[in-house]
Image (tube, grey):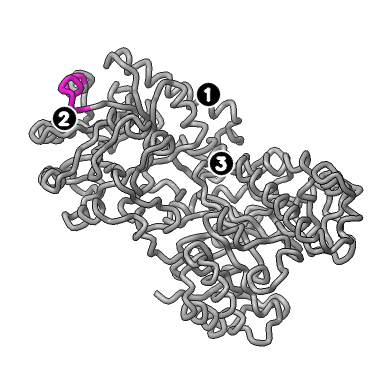
Amino acid sequence: MIRKIMVGLICLLCLGGLIWGRAEAAVAIFCYHEVDRANDDFAVSHQQLEQQLKYMKKQGYHFVSLDEYLRYTKGELALPEKSVMITFDDGYRSFYTKVYPLLQKYQIPGMLAIVSSWTNHEEKPNDVRDTASWEELREMEASGLVTVVSHTHAMHKQQAINPQGGRNGVVGSHLYADGQYESDAEYQARIQHDIDEVQRLFQEKLGHKSRAMVWPYGIYTKEAVDIAIASGMEGTFLLDGGVNEPGEDARIYARRMIMERDVTTAKLQKLLTVDHDAWNTKKLRMAQVDLDNICSDDSAAYERNVKAMLDNLQSNNINVVALQAFADPDGDGNVEKVYFKNREIPVEADIFNDVANRLEQQGFTVLAWLPVLNYQDFIKDDNSNAVKSRGEKGWYHRLSPFAVEDLQKVNGLFYDLAANTQIDGVLLQDDLYLNQDEDVSQPAQTAYREQFGQDLLTAVKDKKQQPAITRWKIAALDKAADDALAAFKKVRPHAIVMRDIYAGALLYPGAETWLGQSYADYLRKYDYTVVMAYPFMDKEEEPYEYLRKVAQAVKAANGTDKTIVKIQSFDWEADKWLDADVFAKQLKTLQRAGMKNLGYYPLGFYHWER
């Protein structure tokens, strides 16, 4: 899902398709921090907290304990439709002095997540005030109202995650130190050691193991979650907005809504009563950014380029960035190097991590834009595992989607990207296609014979078999994408997934045959489909009518909410930027035609209408 959300209620207004809908008996979980601390947006006042608790009591809300929540997610307990859970992070002493008395007064259960190294006085950042003592924690647990759980032992901090020194939460990816990234084994051992120390201290000081993990900053990986569950924890808690329905996902990836100082009673009422599907109102504005244009051997020039990019994105009201993860300086789309550390192909410059981290810190949702098939290092010298045409050749030199063993290297590339960078998801490039004359490579012939018991070269000459062959090709392309995404999701299970599709796949009958792409298939499989609507590159005589037809096709497929229509901002044939009025007219044409989500490529100097 959407990136870890560290800045409050705006999380609920973020990417519509990334917020899950509310059903009956769904549990809203609120995340509080400090109480009565000045100049802290994440702190609420004692009076404010009491008003909120009284309001929820008056409205008939059932307050859910951790034990009830876990039983509910396992299907062992039915909860009232109006159910809410109150959680507090960090283990501040203000919980004992100010929150605990309120829980006693109103007989409300609460969950307190402690950073045990702070509680145990082993380490504590300068900006962290007093924490509740072990004795106070035992007293509160004995009341039956408070459940104490882990907020990690010593992982509530940020450290370097890339060569440029960019910092982020230490759970979220491999760390970078002494000129290298952590290995998989080192990352896993670090997480394991911390959680082992949590459970040792909990058993020693509180007489029980922690039943849950609350991830600092809401940052997590699937690997970290798996280690926590294996240690005896029954669930983990995030900061992704939304409510929770029964099921394993709600148990091990519980979504919480962070409560800030500015949460009024009116805002609280909306949080409690809105159907979260109705929050699907934010319009996505996506820019696709060429890292080729930012990369420079001159560190000062690189910094200027990054700053110019950030300024440009902010001035253009962009909220989603698809950041190029592969190097393609000659623009032919055939990939020989990438911009991130990996174990599969050469690295042009390890800058993707740095740029992505800076973008996320500025509040952008960041996707890695990269291909699945056109990695030249994975194609054999004799091209025996490359896509082969019996006629018209495609415009990319691609690995065959039937070359299953070689595709394992692609999967490894996607895994390394996820492990070494803290990003929100992936935009799959448009190399995932096969035209009507592709693919008759040896891997394709072997796969066809194994599946159908027929010779592919004979079958492709039979028009009656074309529909079946088309479906077979689409399935192979989809599987190549699915396997790469599965590798990515071994680290980032809720990654946003978008996939490029040519506009022709929506507009023209028979497009599935000559592209191997299915819009209906994309709408079903991915969070968003990105339609490449480039009327000037396609030399359309009536470019704006073309865009209107794209919009009509999107609406006809009920794809408005899950589709981003991407336009061009550059004229590649003339080698110049489109005039600003031409760019604006493309946008207005699509907006008037009812398109909700828009994007453009490449990043230019235009402004979205506010």
When asked about the image quadrant of residue 582, the answer is: bottom right
| Residue 295 seen in render | yes
Q: Is residue 246 above or below residue 396?
A: above
Check disc 2 and report its element: helix, strand or loop: helix
Q: Looking at the picture, how far across and down is residue 419, in whole percent?
A: 57, 39
Q: Looking at the picture, how far across and down is residue 35, in whole percent?
A: 18, 41
Magenta-highlighted residues: 138-146
Q: Are marks 1 and 2 in contact (CB under 8 Å)?
A: no
To which residue does mark 2 refer?
96
Q: Is residue 481 above or below residue 152?
A: below
The mark that comes first in sequence, 3 or 1, is: 1
Label 2 – label 3 distance at C-alpha: 39 Å
The amino acid type, in three-letter code, at marker 2 is Tyr
| Pair 2/3: label in front | 3
To which residue does mark 1 refer?
189
- Callout 3: few (<14), some (14-19), or many (20+) C-alpha neighbours within 10 Å? many
- Callout 2: few (<14), some (14-19), or many (20+) C-alpha neighbours within 10 Å? some
When asked about the image quadrant of residue 145, the answer is: top left
- Callout 1: few (<14), some (14-19), or many (20+) C-alpha neighbours within 10 Å? few
Residue at 32% x, 24% y is 116
Between residue 346 and residue 594, name the one nearer to us.
594
Label 1 – label 2 distance at C-alpha: 34 Å
Whether residue 543 appears in magenta in the rendering, the answer is no
The amino acid type, in three-letter code, at marker 1 is Ala
Check disc 1 and report its element: helix, strand or loop: helix
To which residue does mark 3 refer?
489
